[in-house]
Image (tube, coloured by chain):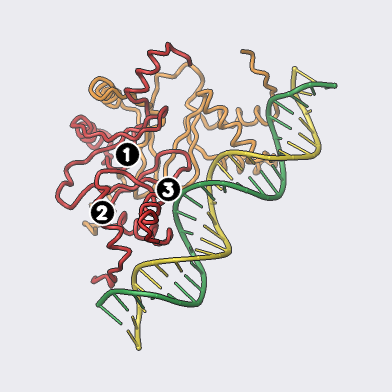
Chain colours: A orange, B red, C green, D yellow
Amino acid sequence: MPKTTYKTKQQDLLFSYLREMQGKHFTAEDVRAHFESKKISIGIATIYRQLDKLVSEGKIQKYFIDDHSAACFEYSGDACNQNEKHAHLKCELCGRLIHLECAELEDFGTHLKAEHGFVINPLRTVFYGVCTDCLNKMENEGQNE
Amino acid sequence: MPKTTYKTKQQDLLFSYLREMQGKHFTAEDVRAHFESKKISIGIATIYRQLDKLVSEGKIQKYFIDDHSAACFEYSGDACNQNEKHAHLKCELCGRLIHLECAELEDFGTHLKAEHGFVINPLRTVFYGVCTDCLNKMENEGQNE
DNA sequence: TTGCGTGCAAAGGTTTTGCATGGCA
DNA sequence: TGCCATGCAAAACCTTTGCACGCAA
């Protein structure tokens, strides 16, 4: 089915942003602000529509972090490095979002499939917890619960 | 610090709901609807405020599933069974939310702590992927990507 | 010329907040 | 009586949608 789609200036701009942000995460608002700072105006609706399209094409990933804060998107890179499947760690204290590239995660995924019949999508999965820095901080301060 | 808090009818009602829903997840709207069906009216603001308080006291857990749909809450039970730390699996296809009680998850948590210095909070962690039922359905239907 | 993509503004849903009132201690 | 908790409505926030216009093919 030959999708009848037009190439537009906004799409190109968005792609250039994706390449620039490869491996980093961003929100729809980040995209808008980025172009605004370059005196380029792209409607936020267009950004959402393009991002949604890219998500459904599997070109970028979308995941949800906090409460009702903005959704995060990420361009994991061009076609080939599909095997670099990282997940994310979200620190509940400092709010930092950390990339996790970890062989053990794949083992765990294998276990989940074998024993629980569930195939995980690591790219969308976020682990909540406390990061190294915050753990150290807590230890130094003694424990004030 | 002796928190000066009052006990209210609404708090009691909410607690009774929590006990009833122990181990199940629910949204703020679920709580409101539950009481409305019993001809009891609790303001949605009160529900959010009470739930927030319980979350910050660690009595219930809050996690985020989909897009911008409502947040899920869960009462994991009274004090003692803290060691039954389950996580959740969210099927991206049928939307089902599945409880995961799994020793391997603890092992993975141990690894994360040892190798990545990150302590996970399984109760808030949601794995995305595809559940058994949907996998079977996909196999039966052949692969329509 | 055709009709997709865009931009604006309005609407949508969930959650938060301000303020007056009600009810616990 | 003092003051926390409640309820209502309005606001805030991110995201989606309707509609007219612009622009790619």
Are discs 2 and 1 less than 8 Å apart at CB?
no
The disc labelled 2 sits on which kind of residue? Answer: Lys
Kindly identify which residue carries mark 3.
A67
**Does label 1 lie on the same chain as label 2?**
yes
For residue A19, the mark is none
Q: Position of residue B27 (x, y in %)?
A: 38, 48
Marks 2, 1: nearer the viewer: 2
Q: Residue at x 30, y 34 (%)?
A: B98
Q: Position of residue B108 (x, y in %)?
A: 23, 31
**Secondary structure state at the residue bearing disc 3:** loop
Q: Residue at x 37, y 30 (%)?
A: B91
Q: Quadrant of the C terminus of chain A?
A: bottom left
Q: Position of residue B34 (x, y in %)?
A: 36, 52
Q: Is residue B79 above or below residue B2?
A: above
**Does label 3 lie on the same chain as label 1?**
no
The disc labelled 3 sits on which kind of residue? Answer: Asp
Specify few, some or many for label 3: CA neighbours under 10 Å numbering under 14, 14-19, or 20 or more: few
Left or right of B122 in this view: A36 = right
For the residue pair B77 and D3, the one nearer the viewer reads as B77
Specify few, some or many for label 2: CA neighbours under 10 Å numbering under 14, 14-19, or 20 or more: some
For residue B125, the mark is 1
Q: Position of residue B135 (x, y in %)?
A: 36, 19
Q: Quadrant of the N terminus of chain A?
A: top right
The disc labelled 1 sits on which kind of residue? Answer: Thr
Tell me the CA gap for discs 3 and 2: 18 Å
Chain for mark 2? B
Kindly identify which residue carries mark 2.
B59
Are discs 1 and 3 less than 8 Å apart at CB?
no
**Does label 2 lie on the same chain as label 3?**
no
Left or right of A92 in this view: A141 = left
